[in-house]
């Protein structure tokens, strides 16, 4: 795997998938964590009718400076279904990095078109306890890529899932830790470099 160019201090992260895949949960958790860790961010979501066969997407823009608007460009894309790529294809550029399962791409030709970091979210989630945990693995990956403090992430997830069964709480923590480990590996290897700075005024 080659070393990707350093990201700017203003990064657009997009997650896309079907309704019910937990994209809104990922957005909720990440935006709360970004605030707790002192980052400027702007989040926007798009819902498409299941009747129309559309996919849902959410964009989380994280910047060293204050931001209050959506951007068309995608720096990091997490496509959770085969349809997801088509949903945002017109926003993908040569600078976009796709993170996820290569078999989630629409066709084999896409593998040569884009920069892809293949992470087997589904299998990793099944190993932990079920595919439902794949979205929390994604939370862990993104948290590590953005250098969110692991202790803060861990504590917040424990509080967020505190009313769940003990086994579910533990599995979600395992999922986050697995994702965080993967994200840290991408940072430490120089595969992805993100240079977003905290805002000391955000508490």
Image (cartoon, rainbow, N blue to C red):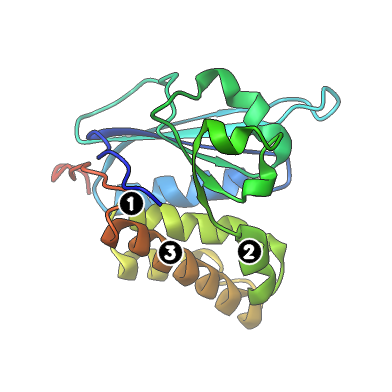
Asked if residue 74 lies left or right of residue 186, the reply is right
Circle 3 residue? 182
Circle 2 residue? 133
Question: Image point 63% across, 31% down: which residue?
Answer: 85
Q: Are marks 3 and 1 in contact (CB under 8 Å)?
A: no
Circle 1 residue? 191
Measured in 3D between alpha carbons, the distance from the residue under mark 3 to the one under mark 1, in whole angstroms, is 11 Å
Disc 3 vs disc 2: which is toward the camera? Answer: 3
In this rendered view, identify the residue nearer to me: 145 or 186.
186
Q: Is residue 159 above or below residue 37?
A: below
Residue 128 sits in quarter = bottom right
Secondary element type, mark 1: loop
Q: Earlier in the sequence, mark 1 or mark 2?
A: 2
Q: Is residue 51 above or below residue 178?
A: above
List x then y, in percent, for residue 46: 60, 26
Measured in 3D between alpha carbons, the distance from the residue under mark 1 to the one under mark 2, in whole angstroms, is 25 Å
User: In this rendering, does residue 18 appear at all?
Assistant: no
User: In this rendering, does residue 131 appear at all?
Assistant: yes
Disc 1 vs disc 2: which is toward the camera? Answer: 1
Residue 120 sits in quarter = bottom right
List x then y, in percent, for residue 124: 61, 68
Question: Image point 31% across, 50% down: which residue?
Answer: 146
């Amino acid at each position: 795997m080659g070393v990707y160019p350093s990201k700017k201090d203003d990064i657009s992260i997009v997650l896309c998938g079907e309704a019910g895949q937990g994209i809104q949960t990922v957005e909720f958790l990440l935006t709360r964590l970004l605030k707790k860790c002192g980052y400027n961010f702007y989040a926007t979501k798009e819902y498409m009718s299941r009747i129309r066969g559309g996919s849902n997407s959410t964009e989380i823009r994280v910047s060293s400076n204050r931001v209050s608007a959506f951007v068309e460009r995608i720096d990091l894309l997490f496509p959770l279904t085969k349809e997801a790529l088509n949903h945002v294809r017109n926003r993908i550029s040569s600078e976009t990095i796709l993170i996820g399962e290569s078999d989630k791409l629409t066709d084999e030709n896409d593998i040569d078109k884009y920069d892809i970091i293949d992470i087997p979210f589904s299998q990793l989630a099944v190993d932990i306890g079920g595919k439902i945990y794949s979205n929390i693995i994604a939370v862990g990956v993104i948290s590590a890529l953005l250098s969110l403090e692991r202790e803060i992430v861990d504590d917040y997830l424990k509080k967020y899932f505190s009313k769940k069964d003990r086994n579910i709480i533990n599995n979600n923590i395992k999922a986050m830790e697995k994702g965080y480990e993967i994200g840290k590996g991408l940072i430490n290897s120089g595969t992805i470099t993100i240079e977003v700075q905290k805002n000391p005024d955000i508490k």
